[in-house]
Amino acid sequence: MLFIGQFLHITNQEEVEEADRRHGEFYMIIEAENEQLAIGKFRRRLMDYRVGSDFFVGDCSIFMVQLLEFDRFPRDNAMVLNYKSTAGDPLMPFIGCSIPSHESDACRIYDWQNNRPEVDGHSERLFLQFRGDEPAPQIIEGQTQLGVANPQSDA
């Protein structure tokens, strides 16, 4: 199976000035036999990035907000993944739509409350966290509650 994970992150949270702190999002893709193996591979790769790149510096928290599972990718008709529309200034909440189609827009409302993302009004669970310059993260267990979307594709 092919898995695509969507992540939100905050970095440099130890910094006093807001302009020195960062937040953002990213996606990861992996082929794995099941959801648990995919999540483990995502964690290991994030640890590699922490040590070998400028990603995820300082006090950093990473939240997995979505996991998509595919048995194949579409061949004839391209599929939109994670359409995003943001209201007003960048600090405002945004609406994100995963794999929208004519049958369903699959939209959710994303917001930040006290440096923790909320999706549709529910606080997301922490996926991985780094402190300072430590390369080893605090592994947060219990992340299997994440709903896995298994969209229909038109092979």
Image (spheres, rainbow, N blue to C red):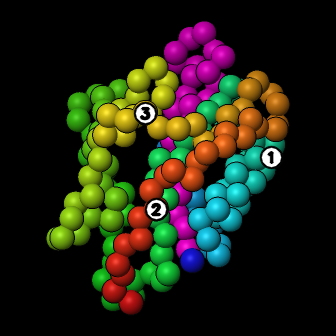
**Relative to residue 109, is residue 116 depicted above or below?**
above
> 10 Å neighbourhood of mark 1: few (<14), some, or many (≥20)?
few
Q: Nearer the viewer, mark 1 or mark 3?
A: 3
Residue 52 bears which disc, if any?
A: 1
Tell me where residue 136 sits by quadrant: top right
**Magenta-drawn stretch contains 41:** no
Labels 1 and 3: the sequence-earlier one: 1
Tell me where residue 139 sits by quadrant: top right
> 10 Å neighbourhood of mark 2: few (<14), some, or many (≥20)?
some
> How far across and down, in percent of the image, does residue 56 sit?
67, 37
> How far across and down, in percent of the image, does residue 11 sit?
61, 30
Residue 14 can be seen, yes or no:
yes
Labels 3 and 2: the sequence-earlier one: 3
User: Between marks 1 and 3, how big is the CA–CA gap?
Assistant: 30 Å
Labels 1 and 2: the sequence-earlier one: 1
User: Between marks 1 and 2, how big is the CA–CA gap?
Assistant: 30 Å
Residue 55 can be seen, yes or no:
no
Amino acid found under the numbered disc labelled 3: Ser
Residue 148 bears which disc, if any?
A: 2
- Evaluate if marks 3 and 2 touch, with contact meaning CB atoms under 8 Å apart: no
**Relative to residue 33, is residue 128 depicted above or below?**
above
Q: Secondary structure at mark 2?
A: strand
**Range drawn in magenta:** 2-23
Pointer 3 residue: 123
Q: Residue at x 46, y 62 (%)?
A: 148
Q: Residue furthest left?
A: 102
> How far across and down, in percent of the image, does residue 77 sit?
30, 83
